[in-house]
Image (cartoon, rainbow, N blue to C red):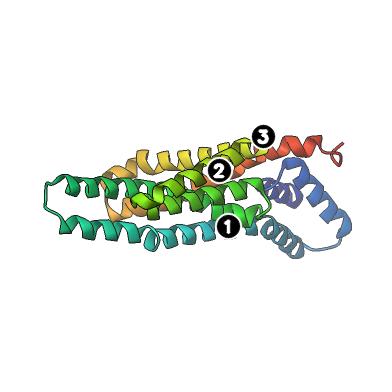
């Protein structure tokens, strides 16, 4: 395998095959005299230029998940636990607090997955992207639910906001598609986290494996689905024609 074929194969892992062939062909035509070392440095620079956004986006996704886990999610759980210890054990109010703790914990896990998508999409596709806006809206709504849903006075406002966001998401075809890919990627990541064989051992090592694996699967699925809804639009655009 010559260097051109090898470089083309490497670039084809991050861009389309046709584009990888064009890039390597242009590189060889514009710099036919450069040696192997300079050629591979050029290929490395191209590889970095195509992958820095996903890499930084994934790193930011991990940081967003960690921040939400340590701060917004911990506050309502700590508050509910304190209230649970102040009421009589076995009373209806006690079990009400226990049920809210269970619900907020599960909702918080789902919200973390939304923040992972939102942070990744913000870096990878930008704030103007509809999928980015949709994922950030869902993550923010999930955070608000975790913080205030257990407070009766806040429920009407949360209901109104939920109805408005749902109407905005469903009124446009592109928003509906974006909503679908965000929910789909989150659902697959949730299944990875809860159905993965490592999860059943309940050890620190297995928890770390799932915590690392689920976001990677989530952003890969999200990127793939995002490309599926973006490609037809690019092909039908005036520039493509």
Look at mark 1 in the image and give the residue it sits on.
57
Q: Secondary structure at mark 1?
A: helix
Give yes or no for contact between labels 1 and 3 (Cβ–Cβ under 8 Å). no
Indicate left or right for 90 with 118 as reference.
Answer: left
Residue ID at (67%, 49%): 129
Please report the residue visible at 71 percent of the width from the left and 51 percent of the height from the top.
7
Residue 38 in the image, given as x and y percentages of width and height: 76, 65
Closest to the observer: 126 or 56? 126
Residue 114 place in picture, x, y as percent: 49, 49
Find residue 235 and report its image quarter.
Answer: top right
Q: Earlier in the sequence, mark 1 or mark 2?
A: 1
Asked if marks 2 and 3 touch (Cβ < 8 Å), the reply is no
Q: Are marks 1 and 2 in contact (CB under 8 Å)?
A: no
Residue 200 seen in this snapshot? yes
- Give whichever of 224, 184 is nearer the camera: 184
Q: Which residue is mark 3?
A: 173
Q: Position of residue 23 (x, y in %)?
A: 79, 51
Residue 221 visible, this orientation: no
Q: Residue at (66%, 41%) from the top-left corner?
A: 227
Rendering coords of residue 101 (x, y %): 28, 50
- Left or right, 96 with respect to 28, comes to left
Circle on res. 104: none
Give the residue pinned by disc 2. Answer: 164
**Cα distance, mark 2 to mark 3?**
17 Å
Label whose residue precedes the other's in the sequence (1 or 3): 1
């Amino acid at each position: 395998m010559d260097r051109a074929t090898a470089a083309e194969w490497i670039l084809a892992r991050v861009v389309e095959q046709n584009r990888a062939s064009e890039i390597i062909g242009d590189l060889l035509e514009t710099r036919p005299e450069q040696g192997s070392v300079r050629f591979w440095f050029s290929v490395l620079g191209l590889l970095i230029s195509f992958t820095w956004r996903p890499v930084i986006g994934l790193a930011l996704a991990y940081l967003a998940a960690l921040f939400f886990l340590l701060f917004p999610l911990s506050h309502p759980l700590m508050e509910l636990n304190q209230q649970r210890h102040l009421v009589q054990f076995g009373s209806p109010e006690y079990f009400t607090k226990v049920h809210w703790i269970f619900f907020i914990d599960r909702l918080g896990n789902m919200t973390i997955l939304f923040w992972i998508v939102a942070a990744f999409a913000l870096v990878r596709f930008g704030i103007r992207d509809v999928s980015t806006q949709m994922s950030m809206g869902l993550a923010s709504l999930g955070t608000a639910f975790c913080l205030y849903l257990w407070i009766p006075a806040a429920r009407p406002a949360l209901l109104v906001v939920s109805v408005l966001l749902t109407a905005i998401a469903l009124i446009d075809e592109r928003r509906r598609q974006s909503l679908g890919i965000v929910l789909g990627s989150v659902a697959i990541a949730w299944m990875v986290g809860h159905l993965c064989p490592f999860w059943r051992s309940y050890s620190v090592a297995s928890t770390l494996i799932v915590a690392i694996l689920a976001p990677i699967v989530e952003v890969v699925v999200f990127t793939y689905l995002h490309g599926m809804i973006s490609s037809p639009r690019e092909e039908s655009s005036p520039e493509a024609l």
